[in-house]
Amino acid sequence: MPIPLPLSMAKVEALACRRAVQFATEIGLRDVVFDGNSIVVIQAIIEGLGFTYGNIIEDILYQALVFHFSDFCHFKHNCNIVADVLAKKTKDYIGLQIWLEDLLEDIAPLVLFDVH
């Protein structure tokens, strides 16, 4: 999902995490693990601390209450190549794009590599 305003990377990561939590709720997931590459955002969520974007962190924590199990994990940027490529593809799309069943042709090899 494109984010139109030029924001700091931490705020973009926080907004992306909030949208991921919303999406997991919308499709009825009950046990979830959210991966992110912003240590600042993930630590704020885990510790329940508001940083500059505390209202977004509070939204994430509140929305995560509906899950039976939820965890927020930090992964270095280079360990999350699929998410990075998908994020960069958002400039080619307008509005929210969701792929549940099919993989984009250029993403499939990255997913297969990530699984091994």
Image: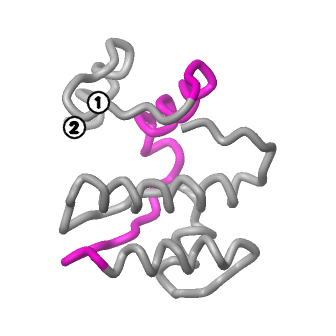
Pointer 2 with pointer 1, Cβ within 8 A: yes
Magenta stretch: includes residue 109: no
Residue 90 drawn above or below residue 75:
above
Above/below status of 109 relative to 74: above
Which residue is more in the foreground, 76 or 15?
15
Q: Quadrant of residue 14?
A: bottom right
Relative to residue 3, is residue 34 drawn left or right? left
Q: Residue at point 30% right, 63% down?
A: 33
Quarter of the image holding residue 54? bottom right
- How far across and down, in percent of the image, does residue 25 sit? 30, 62
Q: Over which residues does the magenta segment extend?
A: 66-94
Residue 57 lies, in percent from the top left, at 57, 75
Q: Quadrant of the C terminus?
A: top left
* Numbered badge on residue 111: 1
Q: Residue at x 47, y 31 (%)?
A: 86
Residue drawn at the location 34% of the way across and 26% of the way down? 110
**Picture mark count:** 2
Q: Amino acid at mark 2?
A: Val
- Horizontal side of 56 relative to 23 (left or right) equals right
Instruction: Give coordinates of residue 65: x percent, y percent.
Output: 33, 81
> In the displayed structure, does residue 8 sit left or right of residue 107?
right
Of the numbered discs in the image, which one, if any, rests on residue 115? Answer: 2
